[in-house]
Amino acid sequence: MDDFLEKYIKAGASKGHKICKKQNSMSAEEIWIREPSLQCEEELIFYKEIFEFILEDLRKIKEKNIITEGAAYLPELMKRLNIDKNKYISIVPSKDFQISHYKKREWISFVLEECQNKEKAFSNWMNRDILFAQKVQRQCIKKEYVSIVNDGSIEINELVHKVAVHFDLV
């Protein structure tokens, strides 16, 4: 899903979606220096705005079963589509896991290169994502979906196995 964000932002902006239009015109400085709670609220709205485009792309796939990932698959949107609780799982990072792993990603410097205070921008970004993960977890509880918090203590093979068991793939 993330590979198509730019496409979805442009499609949403052309349809007049408020947050898509806003994000389409903002610089990295304008995006990341804002208050993390505002970023989080707008991120939730943004994913709701672009969800129609994601569904459109998914409908083009001829396979019966699809495994996909991305923050846009909010539990409340899945519930609205009547996605069974055995067909959806949320994996969110713990705060420490989020920050330590994002710091290692090579593309972070590219995303933040226009920001004057890169440290503050990165901190705001991480705080936004931490708030976002908490909201997703609360939605999972409310909508009765499984949510796993990845703090790095679970080996990747074990995490894959948990997901496979959840989806009845083993």
Image (cartoon, rainbow, N blue to C red):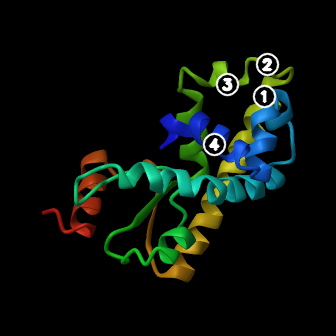
- Earlier sequence position, callout 2 versus callout 1: 1
Which residue ends up furthest to the front in the rendered image? 15
The residue depicted at 75 percent of the width and 35 percent of the height is 24
Q: Nearer the viewer, mark 4 or mark 2?
A: 4
Tag 3 residue: 111
Q: Nearer the viewer, mark 4 or mark 1?
A: 4
Verify CB contact (< 8 Å) between mark 4 and mark 1.
Answer: no
Cα–Cα span, label 4 and label 2: 24 Å
Tag 1 residue: 28
Please rate how many residues cluster around mark 1, counting C-alpha atoms within 10 Å: few if below 14, some from 14 to 19, many from 20. Answer: some
Tag 2 residue: 114
Verify CB contact (< 8 Å) between mark 1 and mark 3.
Answer: yes
Verify CB contact (< 8 Å) between mark 2 and mark 1.
Answer: yes
Task: Please tell me which residue lies in front, 70 or 157.
Answer: 70
The residue depicted at 80 percent of the width and 52 percent of the height is 18
> In the rendered view of the protein, which quadrant contains the C terminus?
bottom left
- Earlier sequence position, callout 4 versus callout 2: 4
* 8 shown above or below 117: below
Q: Residue 160, position in %: x, y?
A: 27, 53
- Earlier sequence position, callout 4 versus callout 3: 4
Cα–Cα span, label 2 and label 3: 8 Å
- Earlier sequence position, callout 1 versus callout 3: 1
